Image (tube, helix red, strand yellow):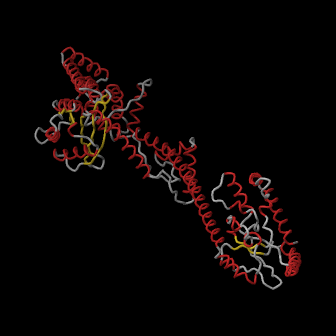
Amino acid sequence: MPSEKRRIQERERQLKEAAKRSTSLQGWLRKSQTADDEPSASAAFREPEPEPIPDEIRTDWERRDEQEDEMRERRTSAREDIEMKSGAESTDFDFLLRSSSCTEQQSKIRSDLHHIFQFSRPMVNFPKNPDGHSFQAQWYNDDPWLEYSPLNDAMHCFSCRNFMNEERFQSRTGWKSVGINLWRQAKVKIKEHHSSESHMLSMIRWNAFKKDTLQRSFAVADSQMEAAKERERQKNREIMFRLMDITLFLAKQALAFRGNEEGLSSSNRGHFLNLVDLLGQYDSVLGLHLDVVKEKQASNQRCQVSLLSNRTQNDLIKALSVYVKQIIQKEVTEASQFSILLDETTDVSHIEQVSFVVRYVHNMTIKERFVQLCDVASTTGEALENVVMKLLEQNNFNIQDVCGQGYDGAANMSGRYNGLQSRIQRQNERALYVHCHAHCLNLVLVESAKSNKHFVDFFTVVERLYTFIANSTKRHAAFVDTQKAMNPDQRVLELQRLSDTQWSCREDALKTIRKVLPAALQYLRDLRECDPPDLAAGEAKMLLSSIDFEFLLCLEIATPVFMETSVASKVLQQDDLDLAAAYSVLDGVLKRVVELRRDSQFSQIYNTATTIAEENDKHSDKDSR
């Protein structure tokens, strides 16, 4: 029959075109061909031969074919202008899409076929048959599997076309390949096909295929999303490593993190942000991150994670402190015994605070580690005991492992009955109390200086001289010019303030006065004799009269004593000093002080003071007074 031959030729042409557009399809088709005794690929796609038509109705079939041929020829030109929205029409290669599980090569073939044969549901001006009926677009809405082929002017079933592969249904080619174009009975045909067994099986396979494809798509999307998250996490880790290094640097140097104004327009945004900007100029990871942050800030957009806020800085400091504490706790646990050191202090806001330090031996090395600084409402022995117990509990330290206590000599610390040391010993009698030797040395110097009125006057004059020169920029500049004029080859020295708490550290102040005394006396004389008189001339005259021979003698006596005690104080404050070495240092200081008290040493000190007084013309000042 002419129409049947044309259909077969059209299917063979489609096979060749599809094979040309996919190299993997050609290889797969060659491998899928059966032996010579089996039908060829084109024969496999060929519909079964129609049953013999009875002679009494053969004439009617032939007449119908001729009418269809004429109608197809008239519609050929019209179909060329039809624009399809869903891709190509139905073909006979859809068995390649049926299998839900396939090899990698078959998966590639399936991907190629999906680009070639798509779900065909065009919205066109459907041609009418001789009876005046045609396909209706609203049928698409009722049945999702329904599709239309403009080339054959017939409707097909997408699920049967692609997912029906049972041998018992191979003869049912109407909805699968040939198509249905009996438009007068279309609704009945659609309803019958919808409830048929073959259609139900193909719909089950289609839904399973869509579910499997969707799951694979989600799996790929999830893996890609997880990979993107991992890259983002790795980038954030690299940024955090650099920010932690900056935090460690500022902490070691005891520098402030924040600035008064941290906006982009500020010239000084604080140490932390300025260091980040500096490193960003030479580090690509940090530089790219800063570019993104600044771009969002410039456009008034909120950056989701900048890692540069004040909260992040505080979190970094806290995280590092927790890590350091963990290391200290681990070493203390391994040492099994440790001593505790406590000292009271008041900050700038006048809040009483207690510093908590532990001392232990780890790997044959003496270590002294600051652990915590906490506020205290009361400084009684009972209150401090509660603070110590709380600190031990917070840091996982056992009170029974404490073998020593180190405090100052205040009654609330060293009291025999209600002091902190006695309260701790009630809980652990092995926790021996030792008064800080460096603090003891400082107390000795304080009491020694207060016991002699000459040295009280001496230190008063030293402090007044520092205040008079250092508290005025004009007088300080004039004093510097005097030093340069008298000693042009020497470095200019600054007067040092006397420490009220660390008397052993007054060595630097006394040594500086010995070196700059001639320049100081000359400056005071010039100020007293200037014309017109300076407002500070009267105070300069009183200072000049106070620096007499007695002052010079006290200076020569106190300087060597404080030089010896300063060295001893520094040694006693070393964290690796043991008790035997501390006693040895103190014995050396005592021997040196006893040696300075000998008549020969005092005569030498007196002669030196006399020489200095003569050089600075202080004998005449003493006589005139």
Where does the image place residue 216, in percent across and percent down from the top left? 59, 58
Which residue appears at 64% of the width and 76% of the height? 195
Name the residue at the bottom extreme.
Answer: 131
Left or right of 500 in this view: 169: right
Where does the image place residue 422, in percent across and percent down from the top left? 14, 39
Name the residue at the left extreme.
Answer: 417
Where does the image place residue 23, in percent across and percent down from the top left? 77, 52
Left or right of 248 in this view: 590: left
Q: Is residue 553 above or below residue 315?
A: above
Q: Give the quadrant of the C terminus.
A: top left
> Where, by quadrant of the figure, is residue 322 drawn?
top left
Q: Give the quadrant of the N terminus.
A: bottom right
> Where, by quadrant of the figure, is residue 425 drawn?
top left
Viewer-closest of 65 and 589: 65
Viewer-closest of 276 and 346: 276
Is residue 623 visible to the viewer in this orientation of the structure? no
Name the residue at the top extreme.
Answer: 600
Is residue 78 visible to the viewer in this orientation of the structure? yes
Where does the image place residue 330, in percent across and percent down from the top left? 32, 37
Viewer-closest of 485 and 392: 392
Which residue appears at 51% of the width and 57% of the height? 304
Q: How many marks?
A: 0
Viewer-closest of 32 and 135: 32
